[in-house]
Amino acid sequence: GQNIDQPTEMTATEGAIVQINCTYQTSGFNGLFWYQQHAGEAPTFLSYNVLDGLEEKGRFSSFLSRSKGYSYLLLKELQMKDSASYLCAVRDGTSGSARQLTFGSGTQLTVLP
Amino acid sequence: GAGVSQSPSNKVTEKGKDVELRCDPISGHTALYWYRQSLGQGLEFLIYFQGNSAPDKSGLPSDRFSAERTGGSVSTLTIQRTQQEDSAVYLCASSSDLYEQYFGPGTRLTVT
């Protein structure tokens, strides 16, 4: 089974940097994903990590430590449009299908002017 | 190109009625997933289709829920004898590989 934990809410100021943490416990591991979801909209893909280290993509970076069961999403130069829910999801490598994702409950980020 | 589409966008039904939700995946995507999201919650996996393989139904919450995928493309999620706890947003996603899943806009189901 899977257990994914992330903070429920975070607040940050426009132009600042924010780090959203995610810890997971899994019987197998085959990748960690971050998705962004604006209110009333579908989730959109942000990043994918399967090896330890930092993946950078513009203002967004994602880090993974498999030994610690830990990931974070780093958002730089925050903009008002970054206010959204950020979902951490883990793919279990031990299941037969090995493709379904288990999602955390999401972290609601509010960016203040 | 066209993304994942779902219909209807909103569905209000009375308790005990059956509902059908439809998903049109991105053309050429062999994998299709159904999730549901209750208010303020994360996504809950329901069912997964991959090509012609038998679907992974491990996430379906009860035998009132079923899904099929015709011709390896369009999928229908059916909920029989709906209950109030079935109220949620039902999201469909498709994928062509092991990485990114592309989500549709969802169907908001309200059971009264």
Image (cartoon, coloured by chain):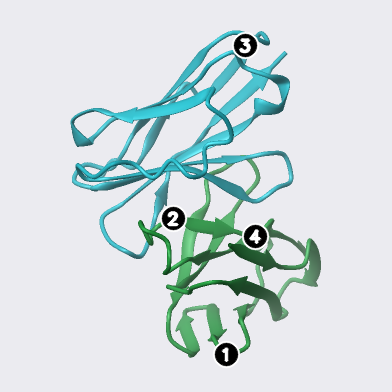
Chain colours: A green, B cyan
**Badge 2 is on which residue?**
A100
Q: In front: mark 2 or mark 4?
A: 2
Point out residue B17 in the picture as x, y percentages from the top left corner.
59, 8
Three-letter amino acid code at the position of disc 2? Gln
Point out residue A26 in the picture as x, y percentages from the top left corner.
57, 71
**Badge 1 is on which residue?**
A67
The quarter in which the C terminus of chain B is drawn is: top right
User: How many C-alpha atoms fall within 10 Å of the one at disc 1: few (<14), some, or many (≥20)?
Assistant: few
User: How many C-alpha atoms fall within 10 Å of the one at disc 2: few (<14), some, or many (≥20)?
Assistant: many
Cα separation, mark 3 vs mark 1, equals 47 Å
Q: Which mark is residue A104?
A: 4
**From this viewpoint, is residue A23 visible?**
yes
Q: In front: mark 2 or mark 3?
A: 2
Q: Earlier in the sequence, mark 1 or mark 2?
A: 1
- Placement of A108 over or under B9, stated as above or below: below
- Placement of A100 over or under A25, stated as above or below: above
Cα separation, mark 2 vs mark 3, equals 29 Å
